Amino acid sequence: MLKVAVIGLGDISKIHIPAIQENPEVELVAVCDIDESLADTVPGIRFYTDYHVMLEEETLDCVHICLPHYLHVPATKACVEKGIHVLQEKPLAINREEGLELVKLEKDNPNVKICICHQNRYNETFETLKKIVQSGAYGKIVGIKGLVTWFRPKSYYDVKPWRGQMKYAGGGVMINQSIHTLDLMQLLGGEIESIKGSITQLLDYSIDVEDTAVANITFKNGATGLFFATNSNAENSSVELHVVLENGKFTIKDSILTKVDEDGKKEEIIEDTKLSGTKFYYGASHIKIIDTFYSCIRNNTQDYVHVEDTLPSIEIIDAIRKSSELNKSIDMEDFQYAKR
């Protein structure tokens, strides 16, 4: 029976905690948050306000880190240094420099597993689409389009001010709402040659971070990518991932993967599993990535989302930001080398 704890009892912990409790081979033994009013969040479970104290007093196999972005790296380091496996929520870090710290931490501690929660990789629609692309059955990839058109009211930032501050969040719509889409785009498209992007604020929220971003991506295999994300939509519309292959077009939208024929007719291929009582755009794959990670801990296997796997999404975000600042295309090899 794995002994598990959760650090951070914010919104995303409401997805993690039920997944932990539903797994018969895992026991939730402790939770931690600096807000003492959350002490009764999980009845019967020991509550701490200092995770350093929790790590000293509890015997733990795995810790879920559900903290604000700027606390991901120090909390993960604290756990790993105690020999405790970590399932850390996205993003990996607030920028590439911090991300490289965790890459080094992972390499220096090969017996401690760190899984980054890029759960959309486990969506049935994406798993199926990835297999289709990799099979070559429809030819080479020509282009990828990723759209995220969501809504965030001013109160979203007022209630938790760190979300609107660059030094704490590492960005806005790119790192918080659409990092999963960027991650899936690079998984399908492969290594990136260059990026030309632009970020802005369409909403008058008096925040540091972007609420809208657009980018043109050139992959090394010749494919192109179009990325657009905003928090200024009227609602949280479905994320859309559209892939053009030489002999076929495929779209994930409304949690359904469809194939579009030459006449524009859509054929449904597979639909994602959905959870009741949660935001539809979270999907059900948190449970899959969590259970998979627990299995890897028990069996000492490596089939989970490693730190280094998620570094590209942070590099893309940094490159889009830099491209917008300089108003020019960014060569990714030069950019990565310059930031080492």
Image (cartoon, rainbow, N blue to C red):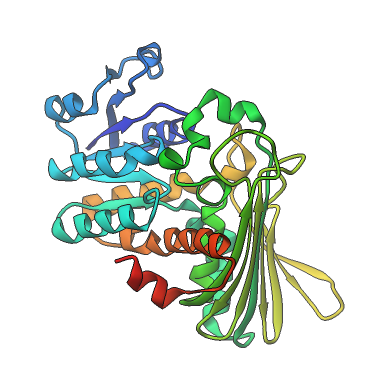
Residues 134 and 161: in front is 161
Note whether residue 82 is visible. yes
Q: How many marks?
A: 0
The picture places residue 133, in percent across and down from the top left corner, at: 57, 78
**Residue 275 appears in which quarter of the rendering?**
top right
Note whether residue 25 is visible. no
Q: Is residue 68 left or right of residue 151?
A: left
The picture places residue 148, in percent across and down from the top left corner, at: 66, 53
Q: Which residue occupies 46% across, 45% down? A: 286
The picture places residue 203, in percent across and down from the top left corner, at: 70, 39
Q: Is residue 158 left or right of residue 21?
A: right
Q: Which residue occupies 41% across, 38% down? A: 168
Q: Which residue occupies 55% across, 71% down? A: 195
Residues 20 and 215: in front is 215
Quarter of the image with the N terminus in it = top left
Q: Is residue 184 left or right of residue 93?
A: right
Q: Is residue 216 left or right of residue 119?
A: right
Quarter of the image with the C terminus in it = bottom left
The picture places residue 202, in percent across and down from the top left corner, at: 70, 44
